[in-house]
Image (cartoon, rainbow, N blue to C red):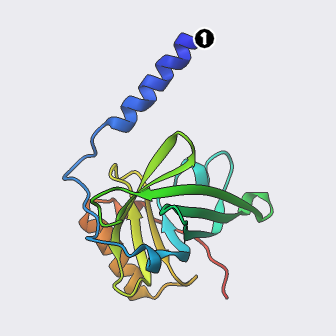
Amino acid sequence: MIRRAALLLLVALAACASPPAGPPVQTVAAVDLTRYAGTWYEIARFPNSFQDGRGRNCVATTATYALRPDGQVAVANRCLDANAGNRETVATATAYAVEGSGNARLRVSFFWPFYGDYWVIGLDPDYRWAAVGAPSREFLWILSRTPQMAAGDYAAAVAAAAAQGFDVARLQPTPQPAR
């Protein structure tokens, strides 16, 4: 039993280490974490197991970031599960900026010792929208400071992701309630 678990762990780690297809993903030059802090509304995403798996269907999704005194970033992701009567689901995490990345590459942990990559690959100069992905190109989120995003801003965010080799045809809109 232990041998099987160890083998599964090794296979999972090898899958995480495989290089992404195409040229390496580039991030924006720098992110001012003070300006980035606050609530972002998810406008679209690539389907993924933690928002769309196990019968879950996350809508009205937000991500809230707060700077911590120790220099790390507190993360709170919220959504309503449309398949469970719009029951709220909250996932909290801690993130830190990768040294030398201008704060554009974050390592996020929802439970230690596991971390995921959160790379800001597109960012409006006024911090109205962000395109966030992973170097594997497996994950992509389009975020906005408002629940509805202007068509031109959405096009700019999607273009930023497409320029980094993300298959933007995989994007699915995230329903947000009108406010």
Q: Nearer the viewer, residue 9 or 96?
A: 96
> What residue is drawn where x is 51% and y is 75%?
37
Q: Nearer the viewer, residue 129 or 176?
A: 129
Q: Tag count in the figure?
A: 1
Q: Quadrant of the C terminus?
A: bottom right
Give the side of residue 147 with respect to residue 119, left or right.
Answer: right
Q: Position of residue 92 (x, y in %)?
A: 63, 57
Q: Nearer the viewer, residue 94 or 164?
A: 94
Q: Position of residue 63 (x, y in %)?
A: 57, 68
Residue that numbered label 1 is attached to = 1
Q: Position of residue 77 (x, y in %)?
A: 61, 63
| Image-quadrant location for residue 25 | bottom left
- Tag 1's secondary structure? loop
> What residue is drawn where x is 45% and y is 30%?
12
Question: Compared with residue 128, is residue 99 higher up or lower down, i.e. above or below?
Answer: above
**Identity of the amino acid at label 1?**
Met
